[in-house]
Image (spheres, helix red, strand yellow):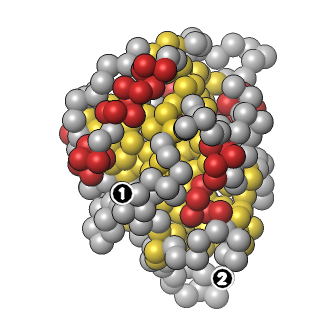
Amino acid sequence: MTSSLPLLAAAPLVAGLLGVPTTGVPAIRQTAAEPGQRAVNIPALPLTAEVATPGTPDVVEHTVAPTASERKRVLDYWTPRRMASALPVDRLSKATGLLGRLFDRAGRGAAPHRSPNGAATRTSGARWTSGGMVERTTGRVFLTIKGSDFVCSASSVRSANRDLVVGHCVKDGTGAWADNWTFVPGYSQGRRPYGQYTARRMFVAGPWSRGGDDSHDIGMVAVNTSDGKHLGDAVGGQQIAFGTPRGRPTSGFGFPADSPYDGEHLVYCAGTLRDDPNGQTGDQGMRCDMTAGSSGGPWLSGFDASTGRGTIVSVSSFKYSDDHRTMYGPYFGDSARELYAMAATS
């Protein structure tokens, strides 16, 4: 499969962490961070082998910040200055060559998306100002990969452990796990109204960890409490669903950081999903011009603007380099269901 560019980076939306994208391939991943500082080396313990075991969920797990002193080290690491200088993950790909497949694949010149009546459509990101649950549950993720600091987006999701975040900025495909990972729900212009939640256990799908398969570009993180509060108790959590019908109207949220956005405000797009026209992934696309930094942000079906509630059915993953007007996200099927089942009770 050709490489894709993630939405991780906060600056260049189309840079590739795993390599330089080519035509027809998603380029950079989540471009929601800014170039950063050297990471604090927090020991991480891989709990599973990266080879699928027949009859068991194909999920790869990683444990981080197991002690109170290490959790404090992560929180102390993210000073306001470091947060402000972190780059969207797509820049990470440019800076280190690590996460390049996360946001921007090289495209094959897909035909423009058209509405049922044949008229060309395009959805521009707009600042979300209506409050509600989506404003509390969506946040920015700050992380370090190979000594560089990045940002992306993610969401709190309902779970048995009341501590679960869904996104995709967790592991660089077949490469490194993220260090200094922390989630800031309700982020706005540097404010952290509900605290910061450090990671304790990270989960990705086996096909993503072993081969960087964009169809399985999903990450879930069980977080530590913040000031003694579970994430779900502090901000709530969106519903999540698997195996839903394709092609439904959906609203996507995130914190795009590349121009014309600045990463400081929650932004959204809305539209009807369509399958990847290049046939390179099982993903669906949404017309949306959000830029790097929005990667990992939640896609909600059945979204109620009056309450800010919906059901998460995907997350922002990549764009094709020759079509920056369409964002793609993985279809939540059996692989995502297995991932959630393990992460939600950890």
Q: Position of residue 282 (x, y in %)?
A: 61, 48
Q: Which residue is mark 1?
A: 190
Residue 83 visible at all: yes
Instruction: Point out which mark residue 116 bears.
Output: 2
Write the residue at 49% across / 55% down.
193
Report helix, strand or loop for mark 2. loop
Q: CA distance from mark 2 to mark 1?
A: 41 Å
Q: Position of residue 41 (x, y in %)?
A: 32, 19
Report helix, strand or loop for mark 1. loop
* Res 339 quadrant in image: top right
Q: Please tell me which of labels 2 and 1 falls first in the chain.
A: 2
The residue closer to the viewer here, 197 or 15, is 197
Q: Amino acid at mark 2?
A: Pro
Q: Position of residue 206 (x, y in %)?
A: 59, 25
The residue closer to the viewer here, 46 or 325, is 46
Residue 337 visible at all: no
* Res 96 quadrant in image: top left
The residue closer to the viewer here, 117 or 343, is 343
Write the residue at 37% across / 47% down.
151
Quarter of the C terminus within the rendering: top right
Write the residue at 38% across / 30% down.
74
Q: Residues within 10 Å of mark 1 (few under 14, many from 20)?
A: few
> Does residue 149 appear to the left or right of 63 in the view shown?
left
